[in-house]
């Protein structure tokens, strides 16, 4: 497996693959890989001849008081894991390669970014949309793979790809969970043992909503309140948001009668975790 650090060597690598007629898959990540990332890479490997995983902790998607500085960076470990599932190359640029001095161009996706994480993390999706556009331009993949765990991010990238006529298919892969239901995330690393236990309140909240739906509840506000009550019972948890929106347009709704995104953001200690479920009647 090759590790590529510059845009020019990545372009040359991709050019050679294209000349051989190979189908190219891209798995964008910020590293500190876990089973969720490996699942994206396996899916990519199934569908593509070569798989490029990017590992880049993107500064433009972090707010000033967020964890950019302490986000875990372990390239050697990540390269070994990516290699074990057949990734062909890793693109791991330094920050100056992606954002040289004088950089001033950004991609803004409107409307669907104006809720959920877009409110709690101003500028976050502008940073995501910008770096993902750059990665798409550098690698020019046929397919790019993202996790459903970041449901709003996945929708933003799909919308951006469509709106800007980007010539690739965005594939969304289901969330991978720990044996007890906690959604896999690089940020789970920050959790102390008591916080790790408390973090289960997110997946339990989603299950509570599904159960209420099964029992016939259709009122979105009622379901939201059940989830809020459950999370508030956990003393280590602080709710950022619990929201239900029609899926995939993220329009507000009162009754659940079609696909509905139930999205949660909860802070446990200093760690902000997100999770979601798509409810279906
Ligand atoms: O989901 C992530 O890890 C990041 O937001 C992404 C898509 C790699 C962009 O930096």
Image (spheres, grey):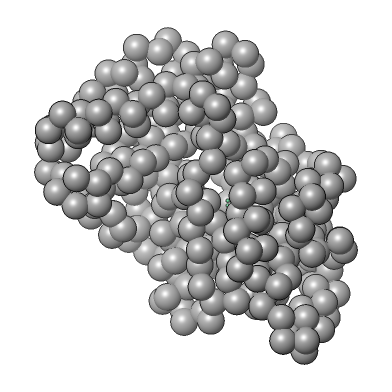
Residue 66 left/right relative to 97: left
Taking the spot 42% from the left edge, 28% from the top edge, the residue there is: 203
Taking the spot 74% from the left edge, 53% from the top edge, the residue there is: 85
Taking the spot 65% from the left edge, 55% from the top edge, the residue there is: 42
Taking the spot 60% from the left edge, 58% from the top edge, the residue there is: 43
Query: Residue 201 in the image: x percent, y percent?
Result: 42, 21
Residue 182 left/right relative to 78: left
Query: Residue 32 in the image: x percent, y percent?
Result: 72, 41
Above or below, 246 relative to 89: above
Query: Residue 252 in the image: x percent, y percent?
Result: 20, 49
Give whichever of 42, 123 is nearer the camera.
42
Residue 72 left/right relative to 275: right
Above or below, 101 relative to 139: above
Q: Quadrant of the C terminus?
A: top left
Q: Residue furthest bottom?
A: 19
Give whichever of 102, 156 is nearer the camera.
156
- Residue 192 visible in the snapshot: yes
Instruction: Write down the quadrant of residue 119 in the picture.
Output: top left
Q: Quadrant of the N terminus?
A: bottom right
Query: Residue 245 in the image: x percent, y percent?
Result: 25, 47
């Amino acid at each position: 497996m090759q590790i590529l650090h510059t845009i020019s060597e990545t372009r040359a690598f991709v050019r050679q693959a294209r000349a051989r007629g190979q189908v190219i898959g891209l798995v964008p990540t910020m590293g500190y890989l876990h089973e969720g990332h490996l699942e994206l890479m396996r899916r990519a490997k199934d569908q593509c001849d070569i798989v490029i995983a990017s590992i880049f902790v993107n500064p433009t998607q972090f707010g000033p008081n967020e964890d950019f500085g302490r986000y875990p960076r372990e390239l050697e470990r990540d390269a070994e894991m990516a290699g074990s599932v057949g990734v062909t190359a890793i693109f791991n640029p330094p920050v100056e390669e992606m954002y040289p001095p004088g950089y001033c161009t950004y991609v803004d996706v409107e409307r669907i970014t104006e809720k959920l994480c877009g409110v709690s993390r101003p500028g976050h999706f502008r940073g995501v949309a910008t770096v993902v556009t750059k990665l798409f331009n550098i690698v020019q993949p046929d397919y790019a793979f993202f996790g459903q765990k970041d449901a709003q991010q996945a929708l933003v990238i799909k919308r951006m790809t469509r709106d800007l006529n980007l010539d690739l298919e965005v594939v969304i892969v289901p969330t991978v969970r720990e044996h007890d239901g906690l959604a896999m995330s690089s940020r789970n690393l920050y959790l102390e043992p008591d916080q790790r236990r408390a973090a289960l309140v997110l997946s339990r909240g989603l299950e509570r909503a599904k159960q209420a739906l099964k029992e016939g509840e259709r009122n979105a506000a009622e379901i939201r309140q059940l989830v809020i009550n459950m999370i508030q019972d956990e003393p280590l948890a602080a709710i950022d948001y619990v929201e239900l929106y029609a899926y995939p347009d993220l329009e507000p709704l009162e009754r659940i009668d079609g696909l509905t995104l139930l999205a949660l953001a909860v802070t446990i200690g200093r760690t902000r975790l997100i999770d979601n479920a798509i409810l279906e009647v």
